[in-house]
Amino acid sequence: MKQPPIAIASYSFHGMHRQGTMDLFQYLEVIRSRYQVDQADIWSGFLPPLDTDDVRKIRREMDRRGLALANLCVDGPTPWAVDPDQRQENHRKMLRYIEVAELLGARTIRIDFGGQTGDLMTDEAFELIVKRYRTYCGICHELGMTIGPENHFGFDRDPDNLSKVRDAVDHPAYGHLLHFGNLPDFMHQMDELLPTVMHTHVAADSLPEAKEIIRRLLASGYEGALSIEHHTADLELERVEWQLATLRAILAELNQDDLSQPAGPDYMQTVYRRPQEDKR
């Protein structure tokens, strides 16, 4: 089995970032020196104002550490917004984020559809989302990047919306960021997304199912990164270390398994679930 690259999402340290104890450059150093990971996954909340000189400084620091950018995860300028003026402003900002992604050497970009989780995606919203993604895909294709949504917020949490937009955009530069979990029936619905998965977020609460999810991904030919994303905003350095070690152990187990067969429980589950009287 070809080992997939591992990334760590900067959002994993959003609590420290909010407290002022971790900035983007500290994040780059931590993932390389502490965790020995060579794939960054930068959340836009960590980025400074998008001045070109600042972005080039970030790229220099990435290159100095031998880091590649698996994903630029953009929050904010969604294609759909209720206010027409906001839609235009979002479009302008998103075009700038694509320029930033190019400067940083990003392999993939995530931008959500917009809307609120549970809301109906109207025909007007659908048509604008498709139009915007066709534009973004055209640009990204020329730059060797892939762009798409993530099943984690707003209209993106509805698998029917994801399929409908994907089929309408119908572009080789359109992809999907697979957030483990976060669909009504994820283990069944993820198969519909597999052909266009461009990147992943492996959340801590998905670890009990992660071995089978990763097996299906790899069996489908997925060649992107597996990116740790932590969410508790507490003890982030230590909890990311645990999450990363668990993922590495799962990959080691899959390396000796038959990927054509459903995955059994990973070792960590057997440890956590072992009855107290069986312990020695």
Image: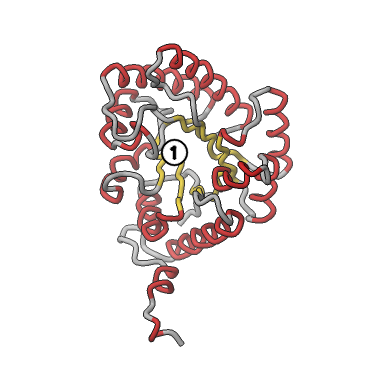
| Residue 227 visible in the snapshot | yes
Q: Quadrant of residue 222?
A: top left
Q: Quadrant of residue 168?
A: top left
The residue that appears at 38% across and 25% down in the rendered structure is: 171
In this picture, residue 277 sits left or right of residue 28:
left
The residue that appears at 55% across and 40% down in the rendered structure is: 70
As drawn, which residue projects farthest toward the front?
A: 19
Q: As shown in the figure, which amino acid type bears the numbered disc 1?
A: Met
The residue where tag 1 is placed is: 198
The vertical placement of 240 against 69, above or below, is: below
Colouring used for the render: secondary structure
The vertical placement of 133 against 234, above or below, is: above
- Count of numbered tags: 1
In this picture, residue 13 sits left or right of residue 137:
right
Q: Residue 148 at what x, y percent from top left? A: 42, 31
Secondary structure type for disc 1: strand
Which one is in front, 218 or 122? Answer: 122
The N terminus - image quarter: bottom left
Q: Quadrant of residue 155?
A: top left
Q: Residue 182 at what x, y percent from top left? A: 35, 45
How crowded pointer 1 is (Cα within 10 Å; few <14, some 14-19, many 20+) is rated as many
The residue that appears at 53% across and 19% down in the rendered structure is: 95
Q: Residue 176 at what x, y percent from top left? A: 40, 36
The residue that appears at 28% across and 25% down in the rendered structure is: 121
Which one is in front, 173 or 178? Answer: 178
The vertical placement of 189 against 34, above or below, is: above
| Residue 28 visible in the snapshot | no
